[in-house]
């Protein structure tokens, strides 16, 4: 496993190369959370309980 210093150096080199982190708006996070919660609720209703 790499040290924290090596990880930071890797991240900085990626940033200098033009890579950017993913940025999501708050409303899209809420939308994804709602969809994920709905799918979990639907899936749990269809699975048999042990």
Image (tube, rainbow, N blue to C red):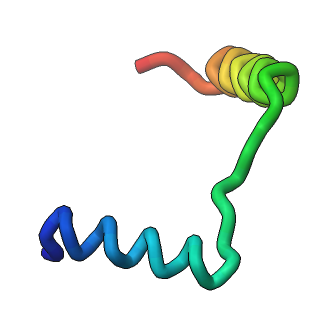
Toward which corner of the image does residue 34 lie, by quadrant?
top right
Along the line of sight, the residue nearer the viewer: 34 or 5: 5
Front residue of 30/49: it is 30
Residue 7 lies, in percent from the top left, at 29, 69
Res 34 visible: yes
Q: Position of residue 33 (x, y in %)?
A: 72, 23
Residue located at (47% from left, 80% from top): 13
Residue found 13% across the figure and 70% down from its top: 3
Camera-side residue: 49 or 21?
A: 21
- In the displayed structure, does residue 37 sit left or right of residue 8? right
- Mark yes or no: residue 46 visible: no
What is the x, y in percent for residue 32?
A: 79, 29
| Quadrant in the picture for the N terminus | bottom left
Q: In x, y percent, where is residue 4?
A: 18, 63
Instruction: Answer above or below: position of 13 versus 46.
Output: below
- The quarter of the picture where the C terminus appears is top left
Decide: is 48 above or below 1.
Answer: above
**Residue found 38% across the figure and 77% down from its top:** 10
Count of all numbered marks drawn on residues in the image:
0
Which picture quadrant has residue 41? top right
Image position of 4 with respect to 41: above or below: below
């Amino acid at each position: 496993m790499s040290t924290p210093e090596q990880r930071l150096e890797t991240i900085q080199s990626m940033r200098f190369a033009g890579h950017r982190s993913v940025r999501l708006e708050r409303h899209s996070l809420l939308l994804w959370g709602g969809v994920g919660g709905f799918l979990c609720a639907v899936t749990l209703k269809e699975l048999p309980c042990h």
